[in-house]
Amino acid sequence: MAWLPLLFAVLLLSACGSAPKRGATPAAGGVQVVDVAPADPIRANDVLMRALGLVGTPYRYGGNTPSGGFDCSGLVGYVFLDAARVYLPRTTGEIARYKASVPPRDRLAPGDLVLFGDKGAVFHVGIYVGEGRFVHAPSTGGTVRLDRLDGPYWSRHYAGARRILD
């Protein structure tokens, strides 16, 4: 459970409103998320620390560096390559088709990729940090930020997850 201190720090830094009960977090579609321990907690911690360190970086379509800004898949690709030495495909659609285990929505682990879409098309990706929260680069004019899976927009568009750090 080496990732728990990091998760606690994330929650303290990103708290907005009351915290959910430990271990069971409301998520997309009213599903309770029970965070599971990552298979590789050291690399998961590295991924989370790198991703959280990029919060506030400007969004830029096609961006994939801290100095140039990020789009969602650029952020995910940069973080996994830099922190875990895992090369991921460049686009969200390719990431959605990436051969990796597919955890159920109610059993996400810190470091999992969370996917969002509509009508069978995946158009957004972020990194799950635990307790129902994820880091992502949301849109033009925005910055890399933390959001909740149970937020109105994200819960409606949740399209699955990929466990890269098995």
Image (cartoon, rainbow, N blue to C red):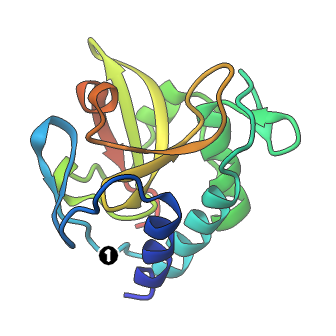
User: Which residue sits at x=60%, y=45%?
Assistant: 76
Q: In front: 8, or 122?
A: 8
Residue 145 in sight: yes
Quadrant of the rendered structure where residue 45 is? Answer: bottom right
Q: Disc 1 on helix, strand or loop?
A: loop
In the current view of this chain or complex, which residue is farthest to the bottom? 2
In the current view of this chain or complex, which residue is farthest to the front? 17
Which residue is label 1 attached to? 37
Position of 103 with respect to 6 (left or right) is left
Q: In front: 131, or 40?
A: 131
- Which amino acid type corresponds to the residue marked 1 in the rendered image? Ala
User: Which residue sits at x=66%, y=19%?
Assistant: 140
* Residue 81 location (% of width, % of height): 69, 56
User: Which residue sits at x=32%, y=76%?
Assistant: 37
Residue 85 in sight: no
Quadrant of the rendered structure where residue 153 is? Answer: top left
Position of 127 with respect to 34 (left or right) is right
